[in-house]
Image (cartoon, rainbow, N blue to C red):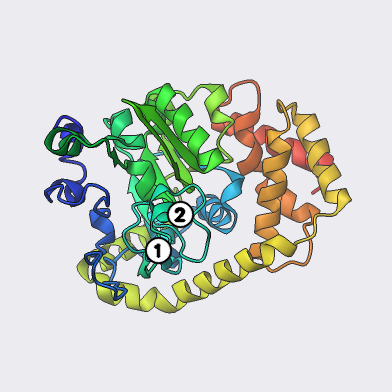
């Protein structure tokens, strides 16, 4: 079929199986979750594949913190990771997702809805209200390949059903699969602007709307968008850049002990993944507990006027456009405070997250990372003190 022609090689998990159940897309191969047939009422979970443990990642503190903040409060918006290849961006996202507690998901729902929440915008759950049995599923991480067509991303008319049975049915796309998880785009700066725009819209609203070929579908698509790219290989338009919540930089470590540590751990993991993961299981569990506690703490966290005012003064000093900078800065600082178990959001939280929340919102040379990072640091020192 033309629809999945370009993705066959990229998504072996979905391409290697015949499309016998087009309304329930096969999960990502890397997640290795076996959904039992719908008639089977027993919840099922298989062991997820062995992922490099998040807690075993050396360095890259800013990236790890940004991803954790996005996991605590997805409303901070997506995370843009700029930097060299081979700096563990994809490893970090997979590691973080694997560390999150498995989620309860409605069996048979292509959007993996939470059985405890009302069906809302879900066309499946709205029509199957009586059978919302659930199973445990790992938090999804969906890769969006550069060659993906818009149909593959947002979903499209199920041609097979249309041709063989004359029915108009919706074939959910990658956005459906990413619901409640992460959508990862490597080299986002090489992706068509139109597609990036669309992804940011869906990420912000949490709803995917598809109107085409006589179909009119809305379905939940709440996910953390993580894009990575090397600015030397193509720029993102500033209008798109500033719609990402956080922007972080990753670099290949330059100090000798860190480099040795990175290589040693990678080697140990590849030689014995299970043994390596066992050594970090305790640290990963501690992180998971902290994340869960932070999520529970977030709604009750106080944002004092003085912190809000400081955030506004910082954005004014930097000349960021609009109010998106302040909003993101506030939400990010609050998520960090929740993660740290603080009772209130303080100036120090702002100080810590200001580079990630603001460096991509400066007017001149938004992709000159070192320049914008230094400018944010200067403004932080001037406005918030050191
Ligand atoms: Zn649903």
Of circles 1 and 2, which is in front? 1
On residue 105, which mark appears? 1
> Residue shown at 68%/67% (left/top)?
297
Give the mark nearest the N terminus, 1 or 2: 1
Q: Position of residue 133 (x, y in %)?
A: 38, 69
For the question of whether residue 210 can be seen, the reply is yes
Say if mark 1 contacts mark 2, CB within 8 Å: yes
Direction from residue 317 to residue 278 in the image, left or right: left
On residue 245, which mark appears? none
On residue 180, which mark appears? 2
Is disc 2 placed on a helix, strand or loop? Answer: loop
Direction from residue 227 to residue 320 in the image, left or right: right
Is disc 1 placed on a helix, strand or loop? Answer: strand
Circle 1 packing at 10 Å, graded few (<14), some (14-19), many (20+), is: many
Q: Nearer the viewer, residue 282 or 156?
A: 156
Q: Quadrant of residue 53?
A: bottom left
Q: Is residue 332 above or below residue 227?
A: below
> Residue shown at 58%/26% (left/top)?
366
Direction from residue 145 to residue 113 in the image, left or right: right
Q: Nearer the viewer, residue 312 or 224?
A: 224
Q: Position of residue 70 (x, y in %)?
A: 55, 52
Q: Determine if the C-beta at disc 1 is less than 8 A from ligand 1.
A: no
Q: Is residue 239 above or below residue 381?
A: above
* Quarter that holds the N terminus: top left
> Residue shown at 47%/43% (left/top)?
225
Q: Nearer the viewer, residue 136 or 165?
A: 165
What number of labels is visible?
2
Direction from residue 190 to residue 65 in the image, left or right: right
Q: Position of residue 81 (x, y in %)?
A: 47, 41
Q: Position of residue 25 (x, y in %)?
A: 26, 50
């Amino acid at each position: 079929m033309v629809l999945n022609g370009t993705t066959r090689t990229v998504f072996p998990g979905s391409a290697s199986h015949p499309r016998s159940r087009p309304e329930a897309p096969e999960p990502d191969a890397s997640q290795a979750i076996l959904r039992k047939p719908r008639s089977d009422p027993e919840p099922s979970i298989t062991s997820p594949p062995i992922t490099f443990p998040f807690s075993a990642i050396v360095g890259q503190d800013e990236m790890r913190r940004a991803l954790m903040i996005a996991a605590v409060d997805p409303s901070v918006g997506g995370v843009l990771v700029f930097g060299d290849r081979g700096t563990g961006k994809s490893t970090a996202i997979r590691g973080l997702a694997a560390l999150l507690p498995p989620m309860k998901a409605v069996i048979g729902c292509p959007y993996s809805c939470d059985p405890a929440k009302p069906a809302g915008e879900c066309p499946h759950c709205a029509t199957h209200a009586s059978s919302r049995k659930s199973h445990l599923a790992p938090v999804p991480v969906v890769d969006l390949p550069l060659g993906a067509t818009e149909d593959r991303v947002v979903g499209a008319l199920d041609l097979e059903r249309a041709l063989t049975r004359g029915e108009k049915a919706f074939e959910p796309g990658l956005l459906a699969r990413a619901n409640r998880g992460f959508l990862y785009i490597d080299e986002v700066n090489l992706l068509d602007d139109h597609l990036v725009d669309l992804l940011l819209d869906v990420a912000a609203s949490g709803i995917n709307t598809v109107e085409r070929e006589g179909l009119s579908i809305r379905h939940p698509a709440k996910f953390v968008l993580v894009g990575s790219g090397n600015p030397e290989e193509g720029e993102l338009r500033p209008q798109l850049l500033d719609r990402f919540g956080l922007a972080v930089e990753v670099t290949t470590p330059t100090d000798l002990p860190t480099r040795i540590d990175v290589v040693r751990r990678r080697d140990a993991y590849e030689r014995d993944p299970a043994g390596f993961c066992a050594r970090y299981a305790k640290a990963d569990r501690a992180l998971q507990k902290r994340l869960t506690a932070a999520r529970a703490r977030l709604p009750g966290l106080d944002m004092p006027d003085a912190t809000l005012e400081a955030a506004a003064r910082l954005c004014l000093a930097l000349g960021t456009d609009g109010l998106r900078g302040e909003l993101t800065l506030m939400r990010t600082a609050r998520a960090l405070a929740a993660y740290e178990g603080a009772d209130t959001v303080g100036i120090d939280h702002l100080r810590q997250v200001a580079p990630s929340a603001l460096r991509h919102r400066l007017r001149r040379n938004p992709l000159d990372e070192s320049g914008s990072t230094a400018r944010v640091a200067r403004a932080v020192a001037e406005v918030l003190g050191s």
